Image (cartoon, grey):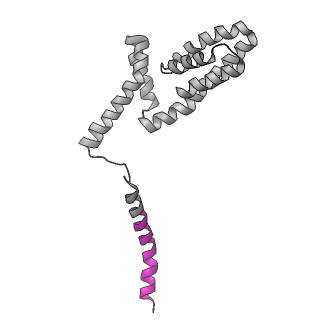
Amino acid sequence: MIVSGISTSVGLAIIDVPAPIVLGVIAGVLTFVPNIGPLLSVIPAAILAFTKGPTTLLWVLALYAVAQALESYVVTPLVQRRAAEVPPALLLTAQTLMGLPFGALGLLLATPIAAVVITLTRELYIHDRLGDHDDGPSTSDDAVASTRLDDAAAASPRDDAQRVAP
């Protein structure tokens, strides 16, 4: 969202489109609305760019395409993987199920609701009920102790061989 808004603002300022900061804020805010938000954010920028000429309009369309591709295919997957690990198929299903009956509001709320449901399911059911805590070492002390044990295990056959040999 921030990446999309800032990159759009900077790009529009370079292209010399009027009100680049306002258009960047609009692009960043509408990025929250999945699938349709980025398309809606192009409309005011395209209108203002067309007042400068058709070449400026083409540059603006290209800028929005690159900014949204960067946001959609690089930034968002990285953030979602670290934040909530929501499978993409589940997101599309949630967007469809929420978007059909509730329209734009359903689309706006589908992703956060899906993330909350996944997180609650993981924390309340999988971790608490099933006891599956596959988090690895929780502190750096545990990691250091684990490394020392691994080093000791690797060194022990050599030490045993030296003790047995005459």
Q: Position of residue 57 (x, y in %)?
A: 70, 12
Q: In the image, is residue 47 above or below residue 109?
A: above
Q: Is residue 155 left or right of residue 132?
A: right
Instruction: Decide whether the magenta segment is chiefly helix, strand or loop.
Output: helix
Instruction: Tell me if residue 81 can be seen.
Output: yes
Q: In the image, is residue 74 above or below residue 67?
A: below
Q: Position of residue 146 (x, y in %)?
A: 40, 62
Q: How many marks?
A: 0
Residue occupying image coordinates x 70% and y 6%:
51
Q: Is residue 5 left or right of residue 127?
A: right
Q: Position of residue 128 (x, y in %)?
A: 25, 42
Residue occupying image coordinates x 62% and y 22%:
8
**Range of residues picked out in magenta:** 146-166
Instruction: Tell me if residue 35 can be seen.
Output: no
Q: Position of residue 20 (x, y in %)?
A: 63, 17
The quarter of the displayed image where residue 67 is located: top right
The quarter of the displayed image where residue 101 is located: top left
Q: Residue furthest left?
A: 129
Q: Is residue 121 magenta?
A: no
Q: Is residue 165 magenta?
A: yes
Residue occupying image coordinates x 68% and y 15%:
17
Q: Is residue 72 left or right of residue 52?
A: left
Of 114 and 166, nearer the camera is 114
Q: Name the quarter where the C terminus is drawn.
A: bottom left
Residue occupying image coordinates x 54% and y 16%:
26
Q: In the image, is residue 81 above or below residue 111?
A: below
